[in-house]
């Protein structure tokens, strides 16, 4: 790769993302309109007649032609206005800003848990193929993927909350006795620490543990499998044989040269897993009454709540672009070949 | 409010509480004294019942944060639980009221000491502004007001600061009860007008988030999608100050999680309760389940007249004889309801409503009836169900499918998502064979028929049209129940419904709410919202 400054690289990546974001805006707009169900009917309430449904349709602007609706939508979007969700009655932007951190906090913790378990497991499995640890890795990953998250979630709630009473009540991000810390980042744990409020910090961590483990168990599999596969490949390659032949210590061979090279595909997988987890942990959110973005999107879809669905898809698209960008940057930094070339 | 203050008043326990086993081992009756924790599977999306898009669970705000001129009374049932009393209207903001001699208006005297939360007195101007708003904003509130013949702002007259008159468009038995439903709540018009704009003359944007009422509770905080917290109004004058200091309404979407929270004692009350859970929770030592038949409400099978075979009355009756009612009641309703089949006479003896229709499972009769029609070899029909209500619709549909197969009718089950359901079933009325439900707030058979049996009306998902029913409903809708003409006309109406069968009733469902044994005073209301002012913790 030709020499190119980091900022130019970032700029180019951002430019590449622009057409996809525009495409996403158009496609979501059209797709939401193609959703079955008529929002005017839904929001007219239980005892509405044709008259009141028509009134509501007019007040939502849904009686206008599609292209006019689109122009209005894009105009609002340019002013940073994502519109107002009808089902929750809140501006979509506010709602996403309050729910996204909840999802991010949970997902990040789950990912940390997942990496902490999956990476060593994958490495050990690869260094000792077909040993008991390899089998264990296989069992854990198969179980993690095949157990539905709502089942794992309910099972953990049943054991650790209902039977043992070790976990706090699964009632969302904080127990009823606590107030959320003043929002800075939107992450309750970090905000509580910033406010110097340890009580709230521990309470927030307590609420996070079970859902994070539930979610983490589900994402163990791709990470562990990818680590194992990449490690096997790396360990089988010639530079490892050279390193071994040169009599380097096993630890250095495996961790520095093996893992150092195997970590690239794992990082790519992490990016995918992260974006996927963020939007798709609806069931975990439901079980733990977690006010995250996944359940928001589902509720919005069910109600044909156009503004909310569009806002969600747009946010996820932008997030996806950002995550991919971050992964690309991380990639260039940790890729050993880049260092050698330089 | 200060965070520390809140922690203090709610009596938080030691540091690290969230993860310390000790803390969570405490049953949450240990939740701070005077605090009631209610968990619900539903989202509250607005503080304003008049707003477009306000959902049903949000009506709880209209009920607890606002007062009305008059309210329904409360009575104790033989089993010791409480229910609202449809026949008794009691003072709310109005201390008394009087119907004019000509019967064409009613005048209310407003309580002298009635004040809003901000301390300003409740006046006739506030009442007029609120009622004008309800009839002008359109959508559900206007429709509901119309049901009580409250249609135009000119009907509402301010006589003086404490005297308010409603002029009737017609004499109707529905007018006064309609003033006690959640919709005609009284809003602090001085506060609201400050936030009204030319584009939004009724301050819907403001009142959507900021209630301005006089009710027994004030809004303390609202985290949309998570919780609503009420604090009691210490200055409430319309009744005794509530026993509960603070109410936390938490959203817990998962049925299983709600059950765990309730059984562990971390929540005082939970709803909705799954039909199959209700009986099990009942048997727990620390819990009770109060189930009340929902008034004027039935789960029904709809037979659409657009579908050719159902245009034949004998086919409709054959279907009614072929439905396995008992099994459905046992397996889909778990016995939680009032059977609406097996009535004795084909002519109703009373005007009680709902009452069982004169059908039961009798395959021979069903076959005989079907044999007299063009469809003796049976036919195929899609049976549509609402996935949003799958806990009863799914098992019911399977059993009906099985029952109809025995007389040669092949029903294929078509599942429709909740959001699409209303459009398909009620607006387009295109579902040939379907499971529906409707409950009328105002508890009269003619009111039910008005919505569900008249041509073009929303809940008439069968496209039913019968000129005699149209005439009977229009004659009885406004008539007083004790009018000698009323009962015979209602009986005739029911008789036609029994025979003509555009809707086959299955059962009258229960409104189930589960709670700790120490929660007292829960009262069933037709709107099925928690009326928190009545609740006590013992």
Image (cartoon, grey):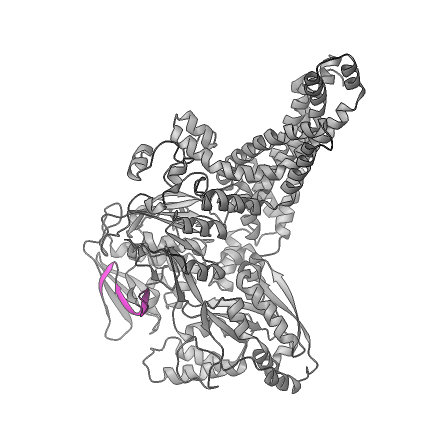
Establish if B403 lies above or below A252. Answer: below
Q: Is residue B111 visible?
A: yes
Farthest residue in the left direction?
B112
Q: Residue at x 52, y 74 (%)?
A: B326
Percent position (x, y) of residue B373?
A: 66, 85
Q: Nearer the viewer, residue B426 or A107?
A: A107
Q: Nearer the viewer, residue B292 or A73?
A: B292
Farthest residue in the right direction?
A238
Magenta highlight on residue B81: yes
Establish if A97 lies above or below B331. Answer: above
Count of numbered badges drawn on the protein: 0
Q: Nearer the viewer, residue A220 or B455?
A: A220
Percent position (x, y) of residue B146?
A: 40, 66
Magenta highlight on residue B45: no
Q: Residue at x 36, y 51 (%)?
A: B268
Residue B111: name its quadrant: bottom left
Percent position (x, y) of residue B467?
A: 51, 81
Q: Is residue A18 visible?
A: no
Q: Which stretch did the figure color magenta?
A: B77-96
Percent position (x, y) of residue A267?
A: 67, 28
- B358 displayed left or right of B240: right
Specify the quadrant that holds the N terminus of chain B. top left
Instruction: Examine the residues drawn in magenta and state their main secondary structure.
Output: strand
Q: Nearer the viewer, residue A216 or A247?
A: A247
Residue B488: name its quadrant: bottom left
- B61 displayed left or right of A147: left
Residue A108: name its quadrant: top right
Establish if B88 lies above or below B12. Answer: below
């Amino acid at each position: 790769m030709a020499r190119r400054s980091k900022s130019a690289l970032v700029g180019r990546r951002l430019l590449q993302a622009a057409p996809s974001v525009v495409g996403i805006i158009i496609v979501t707009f059209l797709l939401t309109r193609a959703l079955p169900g008529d929002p005017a009917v839904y929001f007219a309430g239980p005892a509405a007649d044709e008259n009141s449904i028509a009134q509501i349709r007019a007040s939502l602007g849904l009686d206008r032609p599609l292209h006019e609706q689109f122009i209005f939508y894009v105009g609002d979007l340019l002013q940073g206005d994502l519109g107002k969700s009808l089902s929750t009655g809140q501006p979509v932007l506010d709602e996403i800003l309050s729910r996204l951190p909840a999802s991010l906090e949970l997902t990040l913790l789950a990912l940390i848990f997942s990496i902490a378990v999956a990476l060593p497991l994958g490495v050990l499995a690869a260094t000792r193929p077909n040993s008991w640890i390899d089998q264990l890795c296989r069992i854990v990953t198969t179980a993690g993927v095949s157990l539905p998250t709502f089942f794992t979630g309910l099972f953990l709630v049943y054991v650790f909350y209902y039977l043992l009473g070790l976990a706090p009540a699964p009632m969302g991000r904080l127990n009823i006795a606590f107030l959320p810390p003043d929002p800075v980042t939107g992450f309750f744990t970090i905000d509580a620490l910033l406010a110097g409020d340890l009580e709230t910090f521990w309470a927030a961590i307590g609420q996070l543990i079970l859902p994070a483990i539930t979610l983490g168990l589900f994402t163990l599999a791709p990470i562990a499998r990818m680590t194992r596969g990449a490690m096997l490949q790396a360990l089988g390659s010639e530079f490892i044989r050279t390193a071994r032949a040169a009599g380097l210590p096993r630890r250095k061979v495996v961790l520095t040269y093996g893992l150092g090279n195997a970590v690239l595909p794992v990082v790519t997988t992490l990016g995918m897993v992260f974006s996927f987890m963020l939007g798709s942990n609806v069931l975990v959110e439901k079980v733990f009454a977690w006010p995250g973005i996944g359940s928001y999107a589902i509720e919005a879809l069910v109600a044909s709540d156009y503004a909310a669905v569009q806002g969600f898809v747009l946010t996820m698209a932008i997030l996806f672009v950002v995550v991919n960008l971050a992964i690309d940057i991380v990639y260039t930094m940790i890729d050993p070949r880049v260092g050698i070339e330089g | 409010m200060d965070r520390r203050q809140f922690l203090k008043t709610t009596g938080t326990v030691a540091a690290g509480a969230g993860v310390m086993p000790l803390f969570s081992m405490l049953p949450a009756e240990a939740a701070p004294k005077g605090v009631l924790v209610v968990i619900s599977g539903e989202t509250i999306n607005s503080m304003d019942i008049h707003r477009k898009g306000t959902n049903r669970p949000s009506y709880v705000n209209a009920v607890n944060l606002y007062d009305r001129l008059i309210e329904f009374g409360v009575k104790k049932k033989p089993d010791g639980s409480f229910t609202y009393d449809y026949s008794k209207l009691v003072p709310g903001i109005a201390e008394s009221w009087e119907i004019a001699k000509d019967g064409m208006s009613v005048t209310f005297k407003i309580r002298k000491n009635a004040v809003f939360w901000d301390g300003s007195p409740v006046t006739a101007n506030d009442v007029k502004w609120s009622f004008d708003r309800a009839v002008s904003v359109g959508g559900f509130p206007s429709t509901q007001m119309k049901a009580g013949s409250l249609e135009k702002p000119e009907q509402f007259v301010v006589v003086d600061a404490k005297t308010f008159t409603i002029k009737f468009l017609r004499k109707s038995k529905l007018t006064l009860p309609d003033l006690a439903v959640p919709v005609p709540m009284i809003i602090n018009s001085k506060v609201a007008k400050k936030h009204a704009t030319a584009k939004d003359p009724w301050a819907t944007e403001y009142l959507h988030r900021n209630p301005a009422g006089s009710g027994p509770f004030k809004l303390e905080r609202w985290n949309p999608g998570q919780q609503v917290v009420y604090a009691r109004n210490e200055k409430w004058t319309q009744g005794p100050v509530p026993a509960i200091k603070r109410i936390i309404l938490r959203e817990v979407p998962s049925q299983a999680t709600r059950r765990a929270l309730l059984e562990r004692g971390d929540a005082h009350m939970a709803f909705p309760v799954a039909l199959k859970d209700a009986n099990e929770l009942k048997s727990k030592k620390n819990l009770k389940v109060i189930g009340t038949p929902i008034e004027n409400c039935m789960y029904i099978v709809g037979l659409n007249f657009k579908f050719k075979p159902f245009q034949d009355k004998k086919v409709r009756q054959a279907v009614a004889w072929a439905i396995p009612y008992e099994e459905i009641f046992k397996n889909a309703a778990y016995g939680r309801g009032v059977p609406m089949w097996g009535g004795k006479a084909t002519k109703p003896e009373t005007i009680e409503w709902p009452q069982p229709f004169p059908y039961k499972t009798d395959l021979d009769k069903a076959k005989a009836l079907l044999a007299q029609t063009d469809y003796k070899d049976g036919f195929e029909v899609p049976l549509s169900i609402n996935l949003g209500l799958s806990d009863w619709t799914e098992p019911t549909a399977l059993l009906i499918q099985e029952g109809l197969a025995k007389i040669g009718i092949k029903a294929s089950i078509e599942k429709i998502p909740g959001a699409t359901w209303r459009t398909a079933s009620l607006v387009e009325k295109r579902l040939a064979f379907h499971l529906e439900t409707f409950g009328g707030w105002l508890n009269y058979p003619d009111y039910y028929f008005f919505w569900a049996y008249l041509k073009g009306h929303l809940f008439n998902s069968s496209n039913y049209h019968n000129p005699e029913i149209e005439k009977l409903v229009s004659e009885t809708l406004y008539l007083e129940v004790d009018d000698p003409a009323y009962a015979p006309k209602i009986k005739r109406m029911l008789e036609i419904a029994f025979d003509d069968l555009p809707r086959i009733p299955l059962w009258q469902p229960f409104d189930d709410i589960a709670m700790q044994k120490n929660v007292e005073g829960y009262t069933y209301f037709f709107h099925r919202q928690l009326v928190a002012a009545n609740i006590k913790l013992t």
